[in-house]
């Protein structure tokens, strides 16, 4: 059966085959996005000693509220999309699309396992950086097209913030490139081969921290969510959005969270590599050996861990004040990254083991 | 090399399509009953006054310009980072001079208070 | 396939570039300019200039156009006043356009660049990394122009600050450094005094 599917796929034209594979990838991605919202509510609920959603289930069973994301999606689908007076109609509708398309398109170069990637391009990381930088248009256009003061304030805040943290993020990525000597994400993972000690998180620890915090700021998540800031500017740039138009913004934000988590796992934690890799006694065990060995499940575990940190941050920290956000981005992260780039440069040239030894 | 980029192109198209289909779905399935109160921009219950698109502090432009400059700097760093092992100490020193010149600019903007958000 | 893609993107570049100068809403014009950049980047990619194509998106679409949007969105552009001078400047404009068209017509074409003397470069293999090739020469052979680029960027930083930085002495804001450095003695004065008798 599986062989038959693979051979049939092989006979199809490349374009059709790619579209089918992308669809096969996007459906689980969208489901994970939906259930990430559920996980968020459950986890934050638990941290605040609440139940979280626990009513909506399937076929009369409540099942810990597992039906909640589906119910939310259906509800949003049947809500009216309100286009406010004085709004630029086309721009108003285009901006959610501009927001979600880059969040999905960036997945094209993410490798899931050795050689399992949609587009194995040499400039993979550069592509991710370029595509994600387009996401800021969704926010700016949404804020401007809405013809609402809150939306405009949110958009300006968000744009200046994304812009500031993108530089810190770029510098942190340059550190990874120096360590790996390649822009191809698959080769970056391959450069971390070995056991857990070979992962780039150790020599690049400051860059890793800067990268992840910048990632949180780029996705406008708490504690950097001044673009939405319910208590100050209602809902920020998407205050005028309702129904599916709002849902698309929402999906884009969560898809970006998963993307940032995936990139952090690939760049710093060795992607699909197992922490036990290279320890033959464990990986050759019967039954659990393949599980302990490298594989896509390790990537999923690492992504889940980062997503949990995203939610944990939200439950723990109060919102940053705006001038503090800008100060952190420009005055703390950029100097740290520049200094550490020079340190990494010296380490690479000195062939510091175990990462760059002969 | 080019054939590697075909999935990227398809992925971008699919991404745009997903967004468009979802919004279209919302328009098709949802009711559409506008009235003037519902369509008025939200301003905490007040009647909206004056145009929402106001002039902004020039500081935002400054941040955007500084962003462009540093973005360019990062673009210069990318090829350097991946060939560092090949060009060795000479390339490293070349980049040190480059970074040094830009750090002078960074210190200047810091001291001038351009990074201060008042 | 490649040719089809080239014509699709080329058409889109021409169409969106035309839209940039014809649409009335300036924000929409900027967005069409973004589309133009995006499609030109695709054309560069078809020429196998991988690094430059993606950097075009990163720098122009991701950064420069954001600045344009900031500027355009926040300006009060009065369309009626902009249109006033249209007929008055039309003759001069027409002369400039005709001259430009003639000059472009004379210059465009491979023979002006000596390209007809060379064969078109062969297609590169899948493992070819454009970025690596660029890096190998940029920091060694072209070191001098590279450092000059740094100086130009430095000038840009200084110029941007000189042009736009306005101090506002009347705004009040918090300085976290001072807040953290506050000592008890700065805020609180303990006064020793004898208990007083109730009257």
Image (cartoon, rainbow, N blue to C red):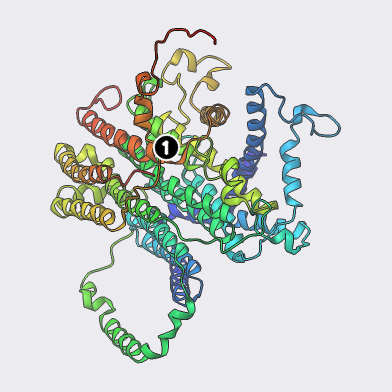
Residue closest to the eye, B93 or A50: A50
Quarter-of-image position of residue A270: top left
The residue at the point 16 percent across, 50 percent down is C147
Picture coordinates of residue A194, whole percent (x, y): 38, 23
Task: Find the residue positioned furthest to the right.
Answer: A60
Q: Going by the image, does A163 lie left or right of B109?
A: right
Task: Find the residue positioned furthest to the bottom.
Answer: C91
Q: Quadrant of the N terminus of chain A?
A: top right
Across the whole image, how many numbered discs are drawn on residues? 1
- Helix, strand or loop at label 1? It is helix
Does residue C82 appear in this view?
Answer: yes
Picture coordinates of residue A210, whole percent (x, y): 39, 33
Quarter-of-image position of residue C101: bottom left
Give the class, few, some or many, for how many residues have Cα within 10 Å of label 1's Cα (few <14, many ≥20).
some
Q: Quadrant of the C terminus of chain A?
A: top left
Picture coordinates of residue C77, whole percent (x, y): 46, 71
Q: Going by the image, does A134 lie left or right of A56?
A: left
Task: Please say if C23 is above or below A107.
Answer: below
Residue closest to the eye, A177 or A247: A247
Residue closest to the eye, A114 or A297: A297
The residue at the point 25 percent across, 68 percent down is C119
Task: Please say if A18 is above or below A339.
Answer: below
- What residue did someone put label 1 on? A324
Task: Please say if A133 is above or below A194.
Answer: below
Picture coordinates of residue A164, whole percent (x, y): 39, 45
Q: Chain of mark 1?
A: A
Does residue B11 appear in this view?
Answer: no
């Amino acid at each position: 059966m599986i062989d038959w599917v693979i051979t049939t796929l092989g006979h199809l034209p490349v374009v059709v085959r790619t579209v089918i594979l992308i669809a096969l990838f996007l459906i689980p991605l969208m489901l994970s996005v939906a259930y990430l919202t559920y996980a968020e509510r459950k986890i934050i609920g638990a941290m605040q000693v609440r139940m979280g959603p626990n009513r909506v289930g399937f076929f009369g069973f409540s099942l810990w509220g597992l039906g909640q994301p589906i119910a939310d999606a259906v509800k949003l689908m049947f809500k009216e999309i309100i286009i406010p007076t004085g709004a630029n109609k086309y721009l108003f509708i285009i901006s959610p699309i501009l927001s979600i398309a880059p969040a999905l398109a960036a997945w094209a170069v993410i490798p899931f396992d050795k050689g399992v990637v949609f587009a194995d391009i040499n400039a993979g990381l550069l592509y991710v950086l370029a595509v994600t930088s387009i996401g800021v248009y969704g926010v700016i256009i949404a804020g401007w097209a809405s013809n609402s003061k809150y939306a405009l304030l949110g958009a300006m805040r968000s744009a200046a913030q994304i812009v500031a943290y993108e530089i810190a993020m770029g510098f942190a990525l340059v550190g990874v490139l120096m360590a790996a000597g390649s822009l191809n994400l698959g080769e970056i993972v391959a450069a971390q081969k070995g056991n857990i000690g070979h992962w780039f998180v150790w020599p690049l620890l400051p860059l890793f921290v800067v990268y992840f915090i910048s990632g949180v700021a780029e996705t406008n998540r708490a504690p950097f969510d001044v673009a939405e800031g319910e208590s100050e500017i209602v809902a920020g740039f998407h205050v005028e959005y309702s129904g599916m138009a709002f849902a698309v913004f929402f999906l884009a934000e969560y898809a970006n969270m998963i993307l940032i988590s995936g990139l952090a796992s690939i760049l710093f934690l060795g992607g699909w590599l197992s922490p036990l890799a290279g320890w033959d006694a464990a990986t050759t065990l019967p039954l659990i050996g393949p599980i302990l060995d490298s594989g896509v499940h390790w990537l999923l575990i690492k992504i889940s861990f980062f997503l949990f940190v995203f939610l944990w941050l939200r439950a723990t920290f109060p919102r940053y004040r705006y001038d503090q956000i800008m100060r952190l981005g420009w005055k703390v992260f950029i100097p740290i990254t520049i200094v550490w780039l020079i340190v990494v440069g010296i380490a690479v040239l000195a062939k510091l083991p175990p990462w760059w030894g002969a | 090399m080019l054939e590697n980029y075909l999935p990227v192109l398809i992925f971008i198209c699919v991404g745009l399509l997903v967004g468009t289909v979802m919004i279209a779905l919302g328009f098709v399935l949802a009711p559409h009953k506008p009235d003037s109160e519902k369509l008025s921009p939200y301003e905490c219950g007040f009647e909206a006054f004056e145009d929402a698109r106001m002039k902004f502090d020039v500081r935002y432009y400054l941040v955007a310009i500084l962003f462009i400059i540093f973005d360019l700097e990062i673009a210069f760093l990318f090829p350097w980072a991946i060939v560092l092992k090949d060009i060795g100490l000479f390339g490293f020193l070349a980049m040190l001079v480059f970074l040094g010149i830009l750090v002078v600019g960074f210190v200047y903007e810091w001291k001038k208070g351009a990074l201060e958000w008042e | 396939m490649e040719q089809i893609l080239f014509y699709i993107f080329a058409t889109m570049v021409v169409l969106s570039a035309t839209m940039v100068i014809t649409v009335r809403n300036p924000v929409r014009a900027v967005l069409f300019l973004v589309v133009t950049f995006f499609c030109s980047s695709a054309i560069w990619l078809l020429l196998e200039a991988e690094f430059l194509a993606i950097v075009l998106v990163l720098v122009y679409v991701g950064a420069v156009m954001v600045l344009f949007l900031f500027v355009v969105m926040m300006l009060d552009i009065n369309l009626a006043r902009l249109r006033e001078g249209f007929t008055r400047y039309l003759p001069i404009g027409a002369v400039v356009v005709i001259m430009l068209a003639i000059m472009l017509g004379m210059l465009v074409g491979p023979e002006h660049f000596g390209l007809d003397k060379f064969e078109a470069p062969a297609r590169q293999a899948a493992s070819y990394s454009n970025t690596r090739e660029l890096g190998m020469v940029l920091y060694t052979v072209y070191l001098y122009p590279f450092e000059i680029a740094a100086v130009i960027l430095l000038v840009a930083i200084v110029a941007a600050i000189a042009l736009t930085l306005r101090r506002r002495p009347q705004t009040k804001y918090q300085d976290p450094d001072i807040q953290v450095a506050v000592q008890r003695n700065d805020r609180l004065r303990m006064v020793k005094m004898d208990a007083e008798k109730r009257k």
